Amino acid sequence: MTQKKPPPSLKRRRVGAQLRRWREDVDMPSGEAARAMGWSGARFSRIERGYYRITHDEVFDLCAKIGVDDPEGIAEVARVAEEPTGTGWWAPFADKVIEAYLDFVELEAEAETIRVMHPKVIPGLVQSPGYVREIHSSARSSRSSPESLIAIRLARQEVLSRAKFHGLVSESAFHARFNNNTGVMKDQLRKLIDASNMENVTLQILPLTAHPSIGSNGAMTILTFRHPWASVGSIDNPMGGSHTYDPDQVSYLEAEFESIASAALPVGESRELLNEYLEGLHK
């Protein structure tokens, strides 16, 4: 039986993709770039696809040969090229959750800004522990155990200590009922109020009175990174989500996010509404 080849690591894929973008920006064919480095076309192709490692010095050499004029960006790509793969707080979960989700977790951990909209549930980065457990207690994936999903969801929230976060929360999420623990929503509301007071967090509530077409196309996350990494758009699905680096698709998601944000309550009114729910003024 043929053993399945492991996919390239996310780090190598990102390094290879950025090198390809630079090469295409200067309109140099891949064969010409490979010859300039003294490599075979097959080796160069595998580097751009993330299957082969490129060293720190080779990144600088390649960029000099293809004429990239971006010292800051080159230094950043060379730094990541030298980092070992399979490292990070998420590494122990590699065999416990599906690959697409692990990719998203690694990307999110590196992001400088995170924008999230979910039409039904509280965004994961601002979920309370009790809410997280309720959401994942019924997980049935053969590869992703509820315990692993709960642990990784809570660990992900550490990114809020450094990244800017803009969350759009549907008011309908506050009407959820949890049979096993009636205090879940109160704790969740307190968590949202605390988060809304953080300087790097922007929370807006999409009110029940908003037109049903607004925010009805599914959950989305938009991640931006330090220069020169491309922004990433992510769409949730049962398989762990799909991610796109395509500039046009990311721009489309950004426009959609801003359209929903413009229909949501301003930050101050959103905080007032959260307090009203916590005080039981809304049923």
Image (spheres, rainbow, N blue to C red):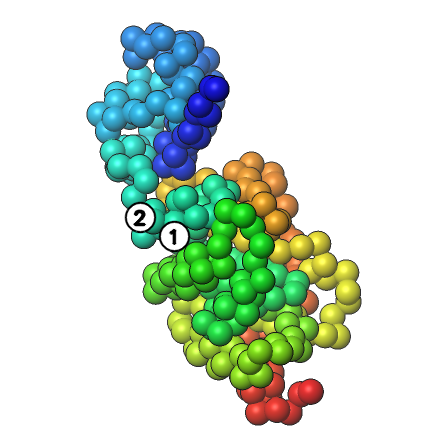
* Residue name at image x 62 percent, y 56 percent: 219
Mark 1 Cα within 10 Å, few/some/many (few <14, many 20+)? many
Q: Secondary structure at mark 1?
A: helix
Q: Disc count in the image?
A: 2
Which x, y percent locates residue 213?
Answer: 77, 60
Amino acid type at circle 1 is Ala
- Residue 86: assigned label: none
Mark 1 vs mark 2, foreground winner is: 2
Residues at badges 1 and 2 in contact (C-beta under 8 Å)? yes
Residue of label 1: 109
Which x, y percent locates residue 179?
Answer: 62, 78
* Residue name at image x 41 percent, y 64 percent: 154
**3D distance between C-alphas at marks 1 and 2:** 9 Å
The correct choice, above or below, for 183 with respect to 56 in the image is: below
Q: Kindly indicate the quadrant of the structure image that contains residue 112.
A: bottom left
* Residue name at image x 36 percent, y 8 percent: 40
Q: Kindly indicate the quadrant of the structure image that contains residue 134.
A: bottom right
| Res 202 visible | no
Apparent side of residue 113 relative to residue 142 in the rendered image (left or right): left
* Residue name at image x 40 percent, y 71 percent: 199
Mark 2 Cα within 10 Å, few/some/many (few <14, many 20+)? few
Depth check, front residue: 101 or 36: 101
Which x, y percent locates residue 87?
Answer: 29, 44
The C terminus - image quarter:
bottom right
Amino acid type at circle 2 is Gly
Q: Secondary structure at mark 2?
A: loop
Residue of label 2: 88
Depth check, front residue: 60 or 123: 123
| Res 30 visible | yes
Q: Kindly indicate the quadrant of the structure image that contains residue 69.
A: top left
Apparent side of residue 178 relative to residue 202 in the rendered image (left or right): right
